[in-house]
Amino acid sequence: MTVARSRIAVYPGTFDPITNGHIDLVDRAAPLFERLIIGVAESPGKSPALPLDVRVELARSAVAHHPHVEVRGFDRLLAHFVAELGAGVLLRGLRAVSDFEYEFQLASMNRHLIPEVETLFLTPAEQYGFISSSLVREIARLGGDISGFVPPAVTEALQAQWQRTRA
């Protein structure tokens, strides 16, 4: 891995929606790299609640305080996206031991597809370890308060989405 590549990291995910746990990882990873790119995957197979453009805008808003953090949507193989960006590091979050097996499998596959890229795992701060996008979506869908788990713009976007869905 060249030095320039190692200074660019990609933090990929569906971010449906971006949570305070995701933002915590960005806050801690951003100082480690010259550029950190949040790659928001289209992921049609996961049937996201929010459209890609909305997820990208919500992520941009949530990390706007970091001048060298970019947010980009993508709809292709992660390995191709990372290669196009010239990144040397894939950033992944681990909330609990239960995440490890799946993340280890992904890291191994990515090592095969893009051997010049290393995977770096970070854990969120303890107060965010239980937050997942799927739980946040479910709480919001059922009318619960998600304001402690996501930025205000995300709360508003999910409430608006569920109101449109019910109408």
Image: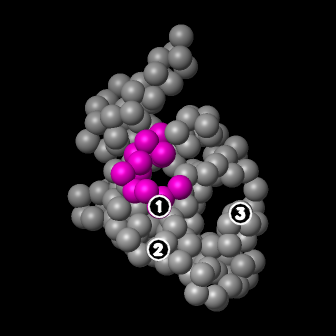
Q: Which residue is drawn at 68% across and 85% down?
A: 116
Q: Taking 82 as reference, is 14 above or below it?
A: above
Locate residue 138: give its quadrant.
Answer: top left
The residue that mark 2 highlights is: 33
Of the residues tagged 2 and 3, which is closer to the observer? 2
Would you say 131 lies left or right of 105 here?
A: left
Q: Residue 68 carries which label?
A: 1
The residue that mark 3 highlights is: 81
Q: From the top left corner, tell me how far across and down residue 99 is, in percent.
A: 46, 68
Q: Which residue is drawn at 48% across and 46% down?
A: 59
The amino acid type found where label 1 is placed reads: His
Locate residue 154: give its quadrant.
Answer: top left
Q: What stretch is highlighted in magenta?
A: 58-70
Could you tell me if the residues under marks 2 and 1 are in contact, i.e. CB atoms within 8 Å?
A: yes
Q: Residues within 10 Å of mark 1 (few under 14, many from 20)?
A: some
The amino acid type found where label 3 is placed reads: Phe
Marks 2 and 1, Cα distance to the nearest angstrom?
A: 9 Å
Q: Which residue is drawn at 35% across and 42% down?
A: 150
Q: Which of marks 2 and 3 is nearer the N terminus?
A: 2
Q: Taking 49 as reference, is 56 above or below it?
A: below
Single out the residue that lies furthest toward the top.
167
